[in-house]
Amino acid sequence: MFDLHYDLLTYIYMNKDNLKKVKKYFKKIFNNNITGGIFNLFYMSYNEMEDELGIKKEEINIIKNLEEVNRLISDNELIPKKIKYIYGIEGLDYLENIEDIDKIYGLGVRSVNIVWNNDNKFGGGAKGNKLRGLTTLGEELVKKLVDAKIAIDLSHANEKTFYDIIELCNELKNKGKRPIVFASHSNIKEICKHPRNLSDEQIIKIAELDGIIGIVSVKPFCIKEERFNKENSKYQKAYIEHIKYVSNLLGRIDNIAVSTDDMTYYKTNKRYYKYFNVFKQEHIKNDLEKLLLYNGFNNKDIEKILYKNFENKILQCV
C-alpha cells in the first residue's frame, strides 16, 4: 500500500538520537504493509514544533533538516530499498526564497504543501483568513513548482487559495506546461463537514487536472462527532463511504488513493492520537484490502486505489 501522506521524515528527525527506536518502528510498518508513498517533513509554528515534536526553533531550516534526514537514512539504511517513496514538505513557511526550490528538489523533494493550517507569505491556510488567497509571491512559487515538476498538495489550503492554485495551474496547462496537483489527506465535505475536507466542486477540479484525492484514515475526517472512541468498525464503514462517494461523483476510481497522516509519534496528547486513526498502522494494507473486497471493489479496483493511481499520477510524473 502506498501512503499518500505520512510524516516519516519528521519521525526520523525527532528520533535522530535514538535510531534503534526508528528501526524498530519501521520494521513493523514496512513488513509487507506500507510499501511506499509520500514521506514528509512537517512544519508548524515555532511553539508547536517544540511542544508537539520536540524540535527547537533554532533547529528549523528546511534545507539543513533535509540534508540531515538524507544522511540518517543513507548511513543507517533506515528505509528498505524496495520501498517506493518521494519526499514531501508539509508547510513552506520556512522557505527562505523561491530559488531554494531547486535545492530541495536536489535533496529529493517532489511534493509540497504551500501552506499548512495557518496563513503564510504564500497564501491562506485552512484555519486562517478565509479571504486570503495566493499572494503575488505565492503565484511565483506555483510557477516555480510546476517548472520543477514538484507536485502541489492542496490539502490544508483554504478555499480561496485552493481555487487560486487551480486557476493558475489551468492557465499554465493551457500554455503547454504540466502541473501536478492533488490532495494528499482530505475527505468529503458532503459526508463530514470538517474544514479540511473537500466539496464536490473541489474534487472535480482536482480530477480535471488528473490529480488524486488521498482519502485519509483520520476519525474526525470520517465522521463529525464531539468525541471519537477506540472502537473502529463504524469509522471503517464511514471511511469506505468516502471512497465510494468520490467514485460515484467522478464515475471512476482512477483519482482515488489512501493516506493515514499517522500522528501517534506526537509528544503531547499521546492518548488522543493513539485512537486518532481508523486503522492500526502496522497492518493497514491487509485491513483495507479486506474491507474494500467486502464492500464490492474488485481486485483491479483495489490495486488502483492502494497502488496504481499514485504510481501513474504522481510517482511517474515527478
Image (tube, rainbow, N blue to C red):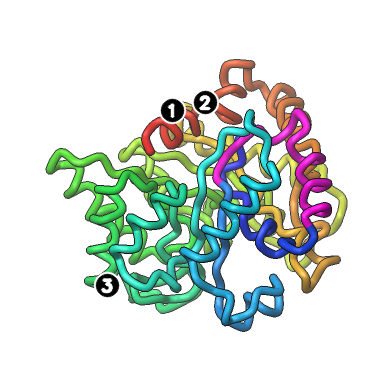
Instruction: Name which residue type carries label 3.
Output: Thr
Graded by Cα atoms within 10 Å as few (under 14), some (14 to 19) or many (20 or more), the crowding at tag 3 reads some
Q: Name the residue that disc number 3 marks.
A: 135
Say which quarter of the image contains residue 96.
Answer: bottom left
Q: How far across and down, in percent of the image, does residue 282 sit? A: 80, 40
Q: Secondary structure at mark 1?
A: helix
Secondary structure, mark 3, is loop
Q: As shown in the figure, which amino acid type bears the numbered disc 1? A: Asn
Which residue carries the number 1 mark? Answer: 312
In the picture of the structure, the residue carrying the numbered disc 2 is 308
Whether residue 234 is visible to the viewer of this picture, yes or no, is no
Quadrant occupied by the N terminus: top right
Looking at the image, do the residues carrying marks 2 and 1 touch, with CB atoms under 8 Å apart? Answer: yes
Classify 227 as above or below 85: below
The amino acid marked with disc number 2 is: Lys
Q: Residue at x 39, y 39 (%)?
A: 211
